[in-house]
Image (cartoon, rainbow, N blue to C red):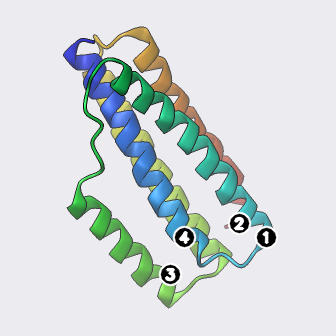
Amino acid sequence: MDEQTRKLYEECNTGCQMAIESMQQIKDFTQDTTLFQLIEKYIDRHSRLGGNAKDHLIDSGNEVKAPGMMASAFSWFSTELKLNLNDDNSKIAKLLIDGCSMGIKTLGERANTLNRADKSADALARKIIKTEEEMIRELESFL
């Protein structure tokens, strides 16, 4: 596996892991059944997509890295603080939409920068971006 492909798979895996961690945390504050089920659905999708990236990395003998400790801690602290102030559906949807937007931006930039990565890595990155866009559309009804 070439370096650009490895880096893109790593970005896909890390992004999905961070998304799952954030959604798991937010899910604990969710009282609306429909919103809860939506979050569960996207945890499952991100698990499968991240697992795909992880499998490619492992199969090619690469180490699978966890998200940075500082990024995870900041995300946890920020989410806890915001939701303890107001945990209504609108606030939850806004936090999730912000996370999706950040994921789209970060992964889109990395996919464009790592433009020599193989087609399967690029396709996975684009599929994750599409999943984030779909999630935003579904969350809009909770605003």
Q: Where does the N terminus fall, quadrant-wise?
A: top left
Is label 3 in a helix, a strand or a loop? helix
Contact check, label 1 and label 2, Cβ < 8 Å:
yes
Residue 102 position, x and y percent, is 40, 50
For marks 1 and 3 on the same chain, the one whose residue lies earlier in the sequence? 1
CA separation in Å, label 4 and label 3: 8 Å
CA separation in Å, label 1 and label 2: 5 Å
For marks 4 and 2 on the same chain, the one whose residue lies earlier in the sequence? 4
CA separation in Å, label 4 and label 2: 9 Å
Contact check, label 3 and label 2, Cβ < 8 Å:
no
Which residue is identified by label 3? 83
Which amino acid, mark 4?
Ile
Is label 1 in a helix, a strand or a loop? helix
Which residue is identified by label 4? 26
Contact check, label 4 and label 3, Cβ < 8 Å:
yes
Which residue is identified by label 1? 33
* Above or below 26: residue 44: above
CA separation in Å, label 1 and label 3: 17 Å
> Looking at the image, which residue is at 79% across and 65% down?
34
Q: Nearer the viewer, residue 1 or 23?
A: 1
